[in-house]
Image (spheres, rainbow, N blue to C red):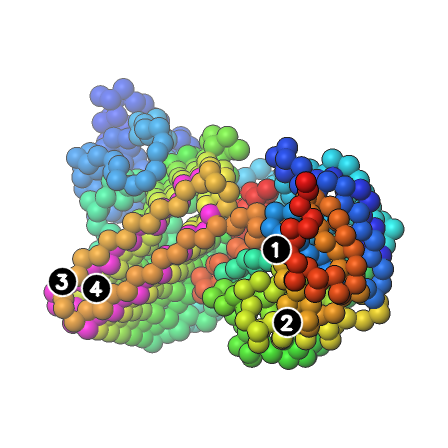
Amino acid sequence: MSNTQDDILEEVVNADYKYGFVTDIEQEFAPKGLSEDIVRFISAKKEEPEWMLEWRLKAFREWQKMTEPHWANVHFPKVDFQEIIYYAAPKVKPQLDSLDQVDPEILKTFEKLGISLDEQKRLSGVAMDVVFDSVSVKTTFQETLKEKGIIFCSMSDAIKNHGELVKKYIGTVVPQKDNFYAALNSAVFSDGSFCYIPKGVRCPMELSTYFRINSAGSGQFERTLLIADEGAYVSYLEGCTAPQRDENQLHAAVVELIAFDNAEIKYSTVQNWYPGNKDGVGGVYNFVTKRGMCKGNSSKISWTQVETGSAITWKYPSCILAGDNSIGEFYSVAVTNGFQQADTGTKMIHIGKNTKSRIVSKGISAGKSQNSYRGLVKIHKKAEGSRNFSQCDSLLMGDQCGAHTFPYLEVSNKTAKVEHEATTSKIGEDMLFYFQQRGIDEETAVAMIVNGFCKEVMDHLPMEFAVEAKKLLEVSLEGSVG
Amino acid sequence: MLQIKNLHVSIDGREILKGFSLEINKGEIHAIMGPNGTGKSTLGNVLAGKDGYEITSGEILFNGENLLELEAHERAQKGLFLAFQYPVEIPGVSNANFLKAAVNEQRKAMGLEPIAPGEFLKMMREKMELVEMKKDFISRSVNQGFSGGEKKRNEIFQMAMLNPQLAILDETDSGLDIDALRIVANGVNKLHTPENAFIVITHYQRLLDYIVPDFVHVMFDGKIVKTGDKNLALELEAKGYEQFELA
């Protein structure tokens, strides 16, 4: 092992010379920019097997041939991909002694979100007392999963310990050259989650990255692979409602889901990346490729997302309904405020017979933000008896924001039935006055209207997540009317 | 209960109320009649605290308190209710949720605990009967897809739930057929007690066949020009408003 490693190291170091970059393997950061050497460096740092390196290199070569997509309804300065650092060792957050040392602004938000004191400490990196021993919680959790034969670990661990599974499935739903950002992610992904649920197993708890051992610093290029074997069930939670600041502006994650016969995957996301300051400066660019493959008959994949953060969101969780009678669902709430821009939606690709899909998208725009829904429903020739229902609703707050809907339909089978409904409503002064005249203040009124608007989506989130997400919506839209 | 003294109100620099005065005591029903554009709805909105009106002079006391210093929702919590001429639709918020929030805000302002769900439901059922609302009404979104008559009945229903001290009905009769008018008026009569008061703003005498006022005020060009009893309404119906036109 160490021999191979040395070989790679030597190769890296020597090869780097000609590009004028000198580094040694002990260094915590890769130099700025992206080249084949950087890809090799990352792979070596992570002690990956040869096949993984080859896979990354293939992606890198594809990426070099590609250009950034510009079809989305978002505008931002060009990203200089040679100015980015693609590898940094997972950082240990400085331990603080008490919450008094945490930025009071962040504490205020925690409080509004109703996050418990212990949780606040964990999120801000404050040393934990004995009562809340997260390590022991995690250990118990891992033991329960192990009994059921469920694999749930970081992508790096999976590559080392379950290489055959990763090798078999990675890139089968989102190929390396799928799109510009997916190719970039495939070349340089830092870490992420891997999950395998064996045949017939119903995962007894919601899986969340929070409980994943070694979850520290998965970084800006996260890669997730989730496989539900025949008859398996899993509910997976990603993200958290607490505000997440990040020095990395560009985030390009890839998530792949695979469901075999009769398997069901429920994937819930709450995204609250830093959206930039009130003038729209400095927020995170979030370019995500998420796709699920209903490979088996009667399989089901359901995406639920609550998006409130990021300066720019470019994200289309999709389902390929390959198996007969398979079902794809997409429930989304996207909130934009300030100068945020979101272009989000889904793709439902019907291939198998009698496949069904359901799209419920709720966009809320406030401030000077732009919120676009973009969705594709594609029914293949052979997808006899397929059904789709799409509902896209927009809620506008104030008159400086925009809501846009771009539904695309490609139907190649006469027996298919596709329905699309869309509404736009506005929270106006008259509506707010109506609430106030009944004794309900403006802030509560906005929260009630927004929660009413989003209810159908929120109902699909796991209970406790939904409570937090509801508060998050209120906080995100605070003070945006009046 | 309510004293309005020499009230002057402008919108965008244009004066609408020009020295409006009125005193209302507990137990009274006051009708305010007058042609379009004399400031009747402005009066209702100013009392309820809607934004966009400039009060240039005058004062309004509600139970001795300066009403103009209170926010709209505070006025409502203190027992002032406006039945809207054009009730808004609120998609996604059910009548039950909306009213529970309203009732609880009022209770909070009075230092009471939130209402128990069972008690609330019972109260809703009782008051719904008052205005002959259908059962599915509870779970429907506020006013969404309601007919004109249903919206007005909903206003009276909300009034019944909040049990205000002073209720202002802003042309609640407009657009109602005779059955709906009877239901609305019947609701108001049942809610009227010696402890509360009503201001009924209307164009027509018709509503006053059902809701009998103690006083009828004729409003013209931003102020009250004549006050009488219910017979004044009949007189107006016969002679019209022309007699008040300024020479």
Q: Nearer the viewer, residue B126 or A407?
A: B126
Q: Which residue is mark 4?
A: A350
Q: Nearer the viewer, mark 3 or mark 1?
A: 1
Q: Mark 3 vs mark 1: which is more N-terminal?
A: 3
Q: Nearer the viewer, mark 2 or mark 4?
A: 2
Residue B170 sits inside the magenta stretch = no
* Residue B119 coordinates in the image, percent (x, y): 71, 77
Residue A387 sits inside the magenta stretch = yes
Q: Are marks 2 and 3 on the same chain?
A: no
Residue for point 32% across, 23% down = A22
Q: Mark 1 vs mark 4: which is more N-terminal?
A: 4
Q: Which residue is mark 3?
A: A412
Mark 1 → mark 4, Cα distance in angstroms: 45 Å
The answer to whether A294 is drawn above or below residue A470 in the figure is below
The residue carrying pointer 2 sits among few (fewer than 14), some (14 to 19) or many (20 or more) residues within 10 Å by Cα, namely many
Q: Main secondary structure of the magenta part?
A: strand
Task: Kindly indicate the quadrant of the structure image that contains residue B155.
Answer: bottom right
The answer to whether B154 is drawn above or below residue A450 in the figure is below
Asked which secondary structure carries label 3, the reply is loop
The three-letter amino acid code for the residue at tag 1 is Tyr
Q: Which residue is mark 1?
A: A434
Q: Is residue A49 visible?
A: yes
Left or right: A471, with A270 as reference point: right
Quadrant where the N terminus of chain A is found in the figure: top left
Tag 3 subunit? A
Task: Kindly indicate the quadrant of the structure image that contains residue A133.
Answer: bottom right
Residue for point 56% across, 79% down = B135
Tag 4 subunit? A
Q: Nearer the viewer, mark 1 or mark 4?
A: 1
